[in-house]
Each structure stands twice: as structure tokens, then as C-alpha cells.
Amino acid sequence: MRIQNLSIQNFRNLEEVSLDFPDGPQLLIGKNAQGKTSLLESIYFLATSTSHRTRLTRELIRARAETAFIKADFISEGIPHTLSAGLDGKTRRFRLDGEVLQKSADLYGHLKAVFFSPEDLEFITGSPNVRRRALDLGLCQKNPRMIGHLLDYRRALKQRNAVLKQNSRSKDLGNLLEAWEPLLVREGAEVLRERASYSLKLLEGASVYYDNLTQSAEELKGEYRSSGTREHWKKLDDIPSVNALQESFLKNLRTHQERDQAMKTTTCGPHRDDVVLSISGASAHRYASQGQKRSIALSTKLAERDLLVKGDDNPILLVDDVTHEMDKNRCKRFFQNILSDSQVFLTFTEKTALRGLLDSCPTWTVEAGTVTPGK
Ligand SMILES: Nc1ncnc2c1ncn2[C@@H]1O[C@H](COP(=O)(O)OP(=O)(O)O)[C@@H](O)[C@H]1O
Ligand SMILES: [Mg+2]
């Protein structure tokens, strides 16, 4: 996958940008707060309609502007496409090859991208919520039909929670809750099975990269903890069938109905799941050093890249500021892993020694929201 042209108007501090990218890794160079991250963010936004920095559309639009626009001409599996996003304060509208995409589900899977950011550390240090979000973003890019299941699950959950809030003392509560069970259980089991499989594949890949990047004897492992079935799985074969998952999820929903009634919310299900990581048996969340956490984050992203490869079409890699804390050897190994990909965008704050490793790559200077070729 390769972006040939990227045009941006009024996205973050980028007022008017139009860039034709030659082949190979692209280096974006600029001091702090000039717009490097914003440029990568605009590409990820085209891929997923999300930003790692905000949920608010308003924040993505340049201050004092009413609307923002992003457009990429790109080649995917050998075929040229154009994807664009128009944002105003309230809405986001996407078009693929000129046709409006009606549902967010239709956006996923066209332009695929993996974002490497310093904030990836939160995948290890953050709350389960952060991990689920990261997993779902990768999963939906890999398997676009999952966005529909996730949205339907969320809808059923919202309705069931509304029933619990409004009718917690009603004698009829059991029946009212039951009305939402079929949808909740059906969509929940689908999400669970796919997300758990995706997570375990991701962890398996990450474990190999962790080995390669750290060249240490430590072993990165992980498991998926399902709150809806009260089970945890370490291997793909451990994950039950969708039917079995439906059955145990339903059973647990009913077992915990009193607790749900008291808490006025649904206390078990895929929306409460987590992935637990460990290094040589010790919880990474609790015990890993900062350096180890960074290596886990990087390994996980590299594994995400691998899961998004289709045939010989790679996703676009957006590598933001993640190398400045790595020593030269680790950087070298990281670059060896990514530089042969179809397209990689890397940001740097200055001309560091690392650039020696990337001498022949095209460079772009980012300054006060403008981007110009060369250094
Ligand atoms: N909606 C917006 N309108 C105008 N400027 C913004 C907006 N959002 C962020 N900025 C500013 O854009 C600048 C560039 O940010 P960023 O892309 O993170 O820079 P870099 O990655 O180069 O350090 C920052 O000064 C930031 O405050
Ligand atoms: Mg930045």
C-alpha cells in the first residue's frame, strides 16, 4: 500500500499541504510543535476515522477554520484509489473514489495504517479500556466486518444498561433485560471470539519481535481474559466456538443479574475484557522497566503490521518520535524490520546520528504547519 499524493486543508495546524511522495521511507523533520504528528494523524484518520489524541472532531479542525479536508491518492493491491475526509464541527464525511461512505463500517480496510507513537506505552501501563481500543482498531482494519459487530454489541449494551438504570426496582426487570439478551449475546460472542483470536495472534508475533529487538533471554507472553465467560486463554486453540461462547456468556449474564441490578450496569462481557502481558512470568503492567515497556509496545506494533499484511500489500507505517529514546543498535534492528515496507513515514526533531542509517531517504521539512521537500 502506498500513498502517492496527500492533500490537507485546515487539519490541526496544517493549513494547506499537498505532497507527492516518491518511493521509499519518508523522513519528516522539524522542531517541536511544527505539525509532524498532525501529518501522521491525518493519514491515520483517513484509515480509521479516529485519532490517538482526541475524540473531538472540533480539535482536529484548525483554530478559526470551520472545516477541514484530507485526501489521499493511494495504491492498494495494485489498484489506485482516492479516499477523502471532510470534517466540520459535528460530522465527518468520507468518500472513496468519489462515492460517499454511508457507515463508518464502510471506511475500514481501504487505507490500512499502523501508528507507532510514544503513547503506545499506554498499551502496557494504561487501563484495560486503552488495550481494548487498540486491539479493536487493529482488528477492524484487519477484518472490517467486525466494526458492525462492535457497534451492534455497544448498542445492545447501552440498551441493557438503560434498562438497569431506569428499572432497577421493577418486578419486571428480568423480562425487560431478557429482551436485550439475544442481541447482546450474539454480538458479544462474535466480538469475543474475533478479538481474542486477534489478540493471541498479535501476542505471538509480538513475542518474536521482543526477542529480536531486545536480544535477551526474557520471554514476552500474554493471555486474553474474558469477563463474559470468566475464562482466560493463552493459545488460539483454547478459545471456544462462537456457540459455546454464547452459552457461557448468557449463563454469566444471568448469574450476575443481581450484581448488575445493584451496580445499575452490565458488569460482565467483552466491554470488560483485558489482555494481560508478562515478561518471564512477571506482570508487565506492574514490573516491567520503562525500557522493557517500550520494547513491548514496539513489538506489539510490529506484530500489528504483520497481521495487516495481505498478499504482498503492506499497511502504511506511521512512526512518530519513537526512536529518540532507543539506543543505536535497537534502532538499527527496528529499522531493519520496517524499512523494506511499502511506505513508512518517520518523524525526527533534528538531524541525529540515526539519520546516518536513513541517508538516502526522501526528506520533508515541517515548519509552522507547512511542509516542504528537502532539509
Ligand atoms: N486544531 C488546531 N488548530 C491549530 N493548531 C493546532 C490545532 N491542534 C493542535 N495545534 C497545534 O499544532 C502544532 C503542531 O502540533 P504537532 O503536530 O503535535 O507538532 P509536532 O509533532 O511537530 O511536535 C502545535 O503547536 C499544536 O498546539
Ligand atoms: Mg509530535
Image (spheres, rainbow, N blue to C red):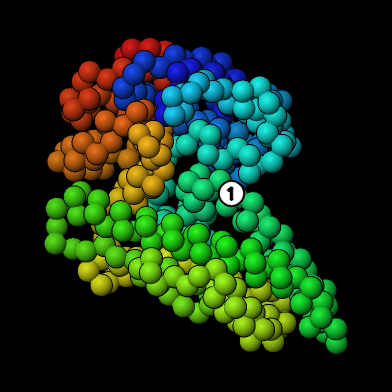
| Neighbours of disc 1 within 10 Å: few (<14), some (14-19), many (20+) | some
Identified by mark 1, the residue type is Arg
Near-viewer residue (13 or 263) = 263
Residue at horizontal 24 percent and vertical 54 percent from the top:
208
Q: Quadrant of residue 20?
A: top left
The quarter in which the N terminus is drawn is: top left
Q: Which residue is mark 1?
A: 145
- Left or right position of 119 against 167: left
**Relative to 236, 173 lies left or right:** right
Q: Going by the image, does 84 lie left or right of 143?
A: right
Q: Is residue 367 visible?
A: no
Residue 193 picture location, percent across and down: 51, 64
Q: Is residue 310 above or below residue 195?
A: above
Q: Which residue is rendered at x = 31% and y = 17% of the image?
A: 362
Q: Position of residue 225 (x, y in %)?
A: 45, 72
**Residue 330: x, y in percent?**
19, 43
Estimate the x, y position of residue 81 in percent, counting from the top left.
54, 23
